[in-house]
Image (spheres, helix red, strand yellow):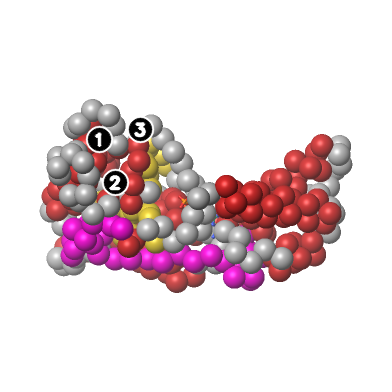
Amino acid sequence: TGRFSKPTLSRSETTFDDVAGQKQAKKEVAELVEFLREPERFQRVGAQVPRGVLLVGPPGTGKTLLARALAGEANVPFFSTSASEFIEVFVGVGAGRVRAMFEAARKAAPAVIFIDELDSIGRTRGTGLGGGHDEREQTLNQILAELDGFSGREAVVVLAATNRPDVLDPALLRPGRFDRHVTLNLPDRAARRAILDIHARNIPLADTSGLDDVAAGTPGFSGADLKNLLNESAIMAARRRADVVTSADLEEARDKIILGTVRTLAIQP
Ligand code: ATP
């Protein structure tokens, strides 16, 4: 997950091969690649392609990664931001940023826009102290206006990520807005193994069967957790001045992450 103070524009090198598991989610997002590659083909026959896609799933399951892979596969610019970054002290600033990002994407079309943590801004309106006129609400209204403002001809796909679809303002989910939902799940054992393979590409392992044990022993881990585990184990090997990561390193890293989680959970109310 990237956290940027301003929307960032980049070319994405990420492809669907970088996303392990999540077969169904990949399939649904892949349908948009063709449209972004050759929008004219769809526009010519008046085909309406879904414009807003909500990526729903627990933290670290690859929502950002999948959005980036869409842009990479289609070879189009990737505009990304976190919705929490839109919320500013000064009323109107967030809405202005939304407007600027959509305008830039329209100019660069075909393009992908990614809004992370949509729930930080997209919670049901009218619950704030600002009597419905606060900064967050204005920003949300601007996102709705931008989504409605697409003429159907512009090849801009807007993806937004959330792990709390239940708190989203229903206005965001109406037809023509984020009306298509793609779910990402925590990986099962086979998917965990595949994720470990991807992130162990540059890590020399003493014995590759170590990854089977890790995959078996990490139910509940997200892709981000697994990546973190591998990195922790590599750091431990480096501290020992070793050339390879051993199964003991992997196990220790796993325990560290589990204990870390337990501790974090313990101090939360
Ligand atoms: P958040 O809800 O915290 O924003 P997210 O769902 O957007 O999380 P990412 O930021 O995409 O998750 O995942 C974090 C990192 O974990 C990714 O950069 C990637 O390296 C790794 N990762 C997560 N899921 C996968 C996966 N399915 N395959 C490969 N790597 C993954």
Residue at screen point 79% across, 61% down:
210
Q: Disc 2 designates what residue?
A: 121
The amino acid type found where label 1 is placed reads: Gly
Q: Disc 3 designates what residue?
A: 6
Q: Is residue 261 left or right of residue 52?
A: right
The amino acid type found where label 3 is placed reads: Lys
Residue 150 in percent (x, y) is at: 16, 52
Is tag 1's residue or tag 3's residue first in the polypeptide sequence? Answer: 3
Q: Is residue 218 left or right of residue 182?
A: right
Q: Nearer the viewer, residue 114 or 264?
A: 264
Instruction: Count residues near mark 3 (Cα–Cα under 10 Å), then give few for <14, some for 14-19, many for 20+.
Output: few
The amino acid type found where label 2 is placed reads: Ile
Q: Regarding mark 2 in the picture, which secondary structure is present there?
A: helix
Q: Are marks 2 and 1 in contact (CB under 8 Å)?
A: yes
Q: Which mark is residue 94?
A: 1
Q: Regarding mark 1 in the picture, which secondary structure is present there?
A: helix
Q: Is mark 1 within 8 Å of ligand 1?
A: no
Residue at screen point 33% across, 66% down:
181
Residue 226 in percent (x, y) is at: 64, 55
Q: Which mark is residue 186?
A: none
Residue at screen point 22% across, 37% down:
135
Residue at screen point 15% across, 44% down:
132
Q: Nearer the viewer, residue 150 or 253?
A: 253
Residue 237 seen in the current view = yes
Q: Is mark 3 within 8 Å of ligand 1?
A: no
**The residue stretch that appears in magenta:** 167-195
Is tag 2's residue or tag 1's residue first in the polypeptide sequence? Answer: 1
